[in-house]
Amino acid sequence: MSPAGRLPLRFSTQTLLLQLGVVLLVVLLSGAVHAWLTFERLGREAENQALTLARTVASDPSVRANVQAISRQPGTPPPAELKAGPLMAVAEGARARTGALFVVITDETGLRLAHPDADRLGERVSTDPSEALAGREVTTRNTGTLGPSAGAKVPVFAPGSGSGSGSVVGEVSVGYSTESIGQSLARDIVPIVLTATGSLAAGVLASFLLRRRLQRLTLGLEPEEIGALVHDQVAVLEGVDEGVVGISADGRISVFNAAAQRLLGQPDLSGQPWPDAPVPARLKALTLPDAREGEAMELVAGEQVLVASARKALHRREDLGWVVMLRDRTELQHLTRQLDAVGTMSTALRAQRHEFANQLHTIAGFMSIGQHQQARNYLERLAATGPLKFPVNQAELLQDPYLQAFIGAKGVEADERGVSLRIGPETLVRGQVTEPQDVTTVLGNLIDNAVNAAVAGTAAERWVELELLDDEGDGGGTLHVVVADSGDGLPDDSNPEAVFAEGFTTAGGSVLQGQGRAGGQGLGLALARQLARRRGGDVTVLEPGNAGGPGAVFMATLPGTTTARKD
């Protein structure tokens, strides 16, 4: 608070007062300059009018003759004679006709021969007549015995001599009162005052309108508050891992923070129209009028799996546009896939634990009844077949224990859904898996997709067949995976590449182009291809399949995921 205990004026109020002060100052200065220029113009007009009248009187032959006659006389006639003389009559007649303040005639020494005040006759003029008596015309502004005036002095030449030549026998002085000039100015000042008042009113109105617009543009915030909001915005937008995209009410991108640039793989798009922005179309669909506000969806952008949601931004009742939030779920997807694999294997191991427990009970039974040879034979059979048995045909072709465990666990899941998972005869994996997370993601998605297709298919026998090959390379071995199923294949009118688009899913029993959801359906194949291409490989469709089976055949290439086994 201020020292007086009062709150300081708001910035908009300060701006309004400053504008009003500037407008008032400009109007006053303009009015003063206009008034001064008008006064100067009227003064010059009065001087020119006085000069014209003085020339007229000085050129009158009777005036010239009478002045010369008086100048030749010794001394000056008495005031009574001058008052009744012809010069007084001419001078007063000219003054009365023109409204001049005075018309004065003098002799060659500057003594008054005609003057409005008869008591001043015969006296020397109060202002210097030397210029006119020297034969030069002058205009003046001075104060004489009759008050301030604007006038002119003109020499009177002797009769018979031309104007500007010959002897000077006197001078004529004419003046107009500056009070009459002030009266003329008073008449002319009315338009000036009206103009100034109108300008002031227009300035005041413009200032109030500008203040209202300023408050509307700043949402009623003061500059200090706006500055604080800018600092807070930068701190929040650049300090969070989530991507934030702000779309203004006119459809332009107003905010595109660093996290959004990183997640979408784009430079700062601020200022660009949102409909034309190079971002996924499903992201733009979140801001359509019929979109459900706040609903989250998963989408793939570049190498990232994102969860996106959009909310309407409102300030009081004003529509400010949309705010789109982006969260990275790529690592979470990988961890989820790993967790699914671990859960699958743990489920399979629990099932095998029951089988193992039954085998131990069998051995214990043989021992309890004294059938030692039967127990020995039973143990030999178990040692030959292994204590654990996954429902995967030809699983012995897999040399890598990680692949054995993971595919075995997937075999248990498939068996529970009535699908037989088998290993193709051409399978040969001599190396050891070094990137289990990537292999889990790609292989798990392909197997799950194939099992879903087999379950949804119309073939009597439901099966999924895998073939895995590895080869050695400089940067690590490459794992090749081929997955076939007994499903109905891809739709006849579909593009094989469409299965890798976001939203393609076999959920619900049929192959369809669905909409991605936060649960992750419709992202498996897209995510698998993104991951494979990030490693320099790919996931492609070898065969689209046929209705009634066999179904589609997919192939994945994963460079750098295996290494030679050390014996």
Image: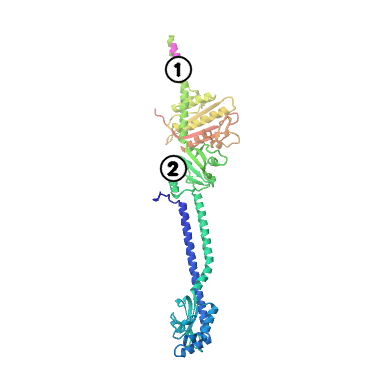
Residue 358 highlighted magenta (yes or no) = yes
Q: Of helix, strand and loop, which one carries label 1?
A: helix
At x 43% / y 51%, what residue is drawn? 8
Residue 390 seen in this snapshot? yes
- Label at residue 236: 2
Amino acid, disc 1: Ala
Q: Position of residue 89 (x, y in %)?
A: 53, 84
Q: Of helix, strand and loop, which one carries label 2?
A: helix
Residue 397 seen in this snapshot? no
- The residue closer to the viewer here, 50 or 456, is 50
Label 2, residues with CA under 10 Å away: few <14, some 14-19, many ≥20: few
Residue 353 highlighted magenta (yes or no) = no
At x 47% / y 59%, what residue is drawn? 22
Whether 187 is drawn above or below 22: the answer is below
Name the residue carrying label 1.
357
Quadrant of image for the C terminus = top left
Which of the two discs, 2 and 1, labels the residue nearer the N terminus? 2
Residue found farthest to the bottom: 73
Q: Position of residue 300 (x, y in %)?
A: 50, 38
Whether 172 is drawn above or below 447: the answer is below
- The residue closer to the viewer here, 554 or 181, is 181
- Label at residue 191: none
Q: Position of residue 395 (x, y in %)?
A: 48, 25
- The residue closer to the viewer here, 83 or 392, is 83
Q: Which residues, given as a range, are shown in magenta?
A: 354-366
2 or 1: mark nearer the eye: 2
The CA distance from mark 2 to mark 1 is 58 Å
